[in-house]
């Protein structure tokens, strides 16, 4: 990530997807502003992400956490780091899902897809709205996904 990256233009949304009969899946949706989107896409592609259709590929990415907050997403074999500022706090359910699987489904979405969180926003309504928005972007072929290993710092 370039030195003059504006963290205010980034949104990280953490959700849990139930996958019966298996364990739930921890998901991290990442959106950066238009200025940085192409760079993030390039880094994700170099790390093994593919267009979001079907099963997510195993990538070389690693999602690092220190306690509840997400610290960073490490891409391109450690050469590129994307850090949320501030790091989103993962719910206990999200942390449990990530630990059980040892990985996180990371979804890179185009600008304008993730709604900003507000204190009055219901988490389930936000997750449902995000899912609808990402599904529409998937139809346009502009969403990448891949699994990232989980590193607890």
Image (cartoon, rainbow, N blue to C red):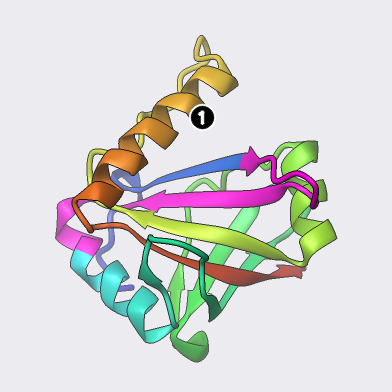
- Compared to residue 119, the image places residue 150 above or below, namely below
Q: Is residue 145 left or right of residue 89?
A: left
* Rendering coords of residue 57 (x, y %): 51, 74
Residue 24 located within the stretch drawn in magenta: yes
Residue in the foreground of this view, choosing between 4 and 132: 132
> Which residue is drawn at the image coordinates 28% and 61% (left, top)?
5
* Rendering coords of residue 131 (x, y %): 43, 35
Segment colored magenta: 16-37
Q: In the image as oriented, which residue stretches furthest toward the top?
A: 120
Residue 10 located within the stretch drawn in magenta: no
Q: Which image quadrant for residue 107? A: bottom left
Note whether residue 3 is visible.
Answer: no
> Which residue is drawn at the image coordinates 35% and 42% (left, top)?
134
Viewport quadrant of the C terminus: bottom right
> Which residue is drawn at the image coordinates 15% and 59% (left, top)?
35
> Which residue is drawn at the image coordinates 38% and 29% (left, top)?
116
- Compared to residue 92, the image places residue 106 above or below, namely below
* Rendering coords of residue 110 (x, y %): 25, 51
Viewport quadrant of the N terminus: bottom left
């Amino acid at each position: 990530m370039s030195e003059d990256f504006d963290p205010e233009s980034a949104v990280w949304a953490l959700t849990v997807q139930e996958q019966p009969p298996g364990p739930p899946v921890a998901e991290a949706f990442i959106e950066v502003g238009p200025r940085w989107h192409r760079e993030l896409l390039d880094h994700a592609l170099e790390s093994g992400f593919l267009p979001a259709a079907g099963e997510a590929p195993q990538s070389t990415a690693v999602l690092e956490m220190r306690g509840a907050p997400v610290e960073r997403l490490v891409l391109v074999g450690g050469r590129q780091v994307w850090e949320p500022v501030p790091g989103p706090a993962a719910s206990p359910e999200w942390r449990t899902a990530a630990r059980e699987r040892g990985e996180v489904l990371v979804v890179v979405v185009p600008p304008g897809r993730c709604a900003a969180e507000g204190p009055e926003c219901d988490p389930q309504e936000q997750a449902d709205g995000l899912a609808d928005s990402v599904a529409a972007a998937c139809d346009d072929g502009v969403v990448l996904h891949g699994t990232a290993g989980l590193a607890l710092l």
